Image: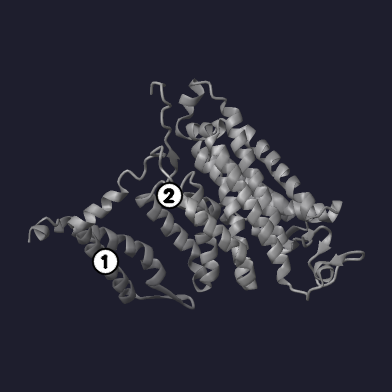
């Protein structure tokens, strides 16, 4: 009885009425109005069921959240919007046991996976690269970039155009695409150094659309909407096709094994996995170096950092360039994986998806970005029956995350430093 008397029924009823009003506004025009030729048929019963279900659910949820166990559980989310979480100096993460097991599973995975599952994981790793790159720009430096897909397109079209006009292959374009994307990041970053927040987002969004429109309309150079073919990668000059080009040798003939179309994807998976591990190592080192601390300091308070003598121009440019170079690498792998590129693969929705990976995973959190990349890219592929509702699910996830976990699933953690003996703290 004491627990029941502490329930605020009036507050719960107001919550349920407000939730019902929102449900009526959202679902009324969609579910309650049905087109029949040139006429409209109203379906008030269906709308009433939906609104009633939402109100009952909200009423029960409000009453449940007022109980003592629910209040204790809700306290876990209090303070989740705080910044960097400092761990004890002697803290040892459990990841030191989990990471070797994950790496071992990743090494044996291609030998047991089907072609479809292998291609899905390759796509997930590509988005891990994209998420890690944008995490530097948005998560660490605090620069809202809505045109990040432009650097992704530069990497993909760099491979296609390099092969078409210069005869360059996968290995030649891989470092060049990173350099070209970094240069594009510098060209974008330098004019917008004084912009913040919404203004920066609008400029970067415009940059992404400019790149897409150029690729779409320059028919004589990029092929326009028809796209361009991309050559398959090679290993020491050995090709992965059934038949090699004139003067070439297929890898299965060189090894004396039957032809397997999965060999190309196994090779892309292996190289992509090594690249992701390298980027993870470099990013981890950078975040512990002065440049990483400068990114985070600039994100928290730019005026204070500039007052302390921090060169904000170099700090912002370094974030733009490093993030763009990672997207350039991902673009090369995407083009090799697809075997074909066209502008429809580099729309604003891709930028929004990559930004959702960073926000949902955790602003600045490497582990969170890796997990979110696989959740948001692999899950829709495995659950294709819900593909039409992907944008709706993304929106719901973003709203829930902003309410419950504004810093993302996994917050940034830093290990504290123990004072050295004989040195005053």
**Residue occupied by mark 2:** 408
* Between marks 1 and 2 in the image, the one whose residue lies nearer the viewer: 2
Tell me: 107 left or right of 412. right
- Graded by Cα atoms within 10 Å as few (under 14), some (14 to 19) or many (20 or more), the crowding at tag 1 reads some
- Residue reaching furthest bottom? 36
Task: Check the picture and name the quadrant holding the C terminus.
Answer: top left
Tell me the quarter of the picture where residue 324 sits.
Answer: top right
Which disc number belongs to residue 57?
Answer: 1
Q: How many marks?
A: 2
* Residue shown at 59% from the left, 56% from the top: 127
Task: Check the picture and name the quadrant holding the N terminus.
Answer: bottom left
Q: Are marks 1 and 2 in contact (CB under 8 Å)?
A: no
Question: Which of the two residues, 409 or 257, is positioned nearer the viewer here?
Answer: 257
Q: Position of residue 361 (x, y in %)?
A: 47, 52
Q: Position of residue 297 (x, y in %)?
A: 48, 31
- Graded by Cα atoms within 10 Å as few (under 14), some (14 to 19) or many (20 or more), the crowding at tag 2 reads many
Q: From what the image shows, is residue 315 above or below residue 279?
A: above
* Residue shown at 73% from the left, 63% from the top: 340
- Residue reaching furthest left? 1
* Residue shown at 68% from the left, 53% from the top: 331
**Secondary structure beneath disc 1?**
helix
Question: Which of the two residues, 10 or 367, is positioned nearer the viewer here?
Answer: 367
* Residue shown at 91% from the left, 66% from the top: 246
Q: Is residue 69 visible?
A: yes
Q: Position of residue 347 (x, y in %)?
A: 62, 55
Q: Position of residue 87 (x, y in %)?
A: 39, 40
- Residue reaching furthest front? 421
Which disc number belongs to residue 171?
Answer: none
Q: CA distance from mark 1 to mark 2?
A: 26 Å
Q: From what the image shows, is residue 162 above or below residue 389?
A: above
Q: From what the image shows, is residue 301 above or below residue 93?
A: above
Tell me: 225 left or right of 107. right
């Amino acid at each position: 009885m004491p627990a029941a008397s502490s329930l605020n029924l009036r507050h719960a009823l107001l919550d349920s009425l407000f939730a019902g009003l929102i449900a009526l506004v959202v679902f009324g025009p969609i579910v309650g109005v049905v087109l029949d030729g040139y006429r409209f048929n109203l379906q008030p019963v269906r709308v009433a069921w939906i609104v009633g279900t939402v109100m009952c659910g909200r009423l029960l949820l409000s009453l449940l959240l007022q109980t003592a166990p629910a209040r204790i559980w809700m306290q876990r989310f209090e303070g989740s919007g705080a910044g960097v979480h400092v761990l004890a100096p002697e803290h040892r993460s459990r990841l030191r046991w989990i990471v070797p097991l994950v790496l071992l599973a990743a090494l044996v995975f291609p030998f047991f996976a089907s072609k479809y599952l292998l291609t899905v994981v390759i796509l997930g790793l590509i988005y891990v690269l994209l998420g890690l790159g944008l995490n530097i720009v948005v998560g660490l430096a605090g620069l809202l970039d809505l045109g990040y897909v432009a650097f992704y397109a530069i990497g993909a079209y760099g491979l296609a155009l390099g092969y078409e006009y210069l005869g360059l292959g996968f290995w030649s374009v891989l470092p060049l695409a990173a350099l070209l994307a970094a240069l594009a990041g510098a060209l974008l970053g330098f004019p917008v150094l004084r912009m913040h927040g919404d203004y920066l987002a609008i400029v970067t969004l415009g940059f992404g659309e400019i790149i897409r429109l150029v690729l779409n309309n320059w028919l004589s150079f990029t092929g326009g909407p028809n796209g361009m073919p991309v050559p398959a990668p090679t290993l020491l000059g050995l090709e992965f096709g059934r038949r090699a080009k004139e003067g070439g040798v297929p890898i299965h003939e060189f090894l004396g094994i039957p032809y397997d179309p999965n060999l190309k994807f196994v090779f892309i998976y292996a190289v992509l996995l090594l690249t992701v591990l390298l980027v993870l190592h470099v990013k981890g080192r950078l975040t512990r170096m002065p440049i990483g601390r400068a990114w985070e300091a600039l994100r928290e308070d730019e005026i204070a950092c500039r007052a302390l003598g921090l060169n904000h121009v170099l700090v912002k440019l370094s974030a733009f360039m490093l993030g763009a170079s990672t997207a350039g690498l991902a673009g090369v792998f995407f083009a090799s994986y697809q075997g074909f590129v066209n502008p429809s693969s580099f729309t604003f929705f891709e930028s929004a998806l990559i930004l959702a990976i960073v926000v949902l995973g955790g602003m600045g959190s490497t582990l969170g970005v890796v997990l979110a990349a696989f959740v948001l890219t692999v899950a829709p592929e495995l659950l294709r029956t819900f593909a039409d509702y992907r944008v709706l699910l993304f929106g719901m996830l973003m709203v829930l995350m902003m309410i419950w976990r504004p810093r993302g699933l996994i917050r940034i953690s830093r290990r504290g430093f123990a004072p050295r003996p004989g040195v005053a703290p």
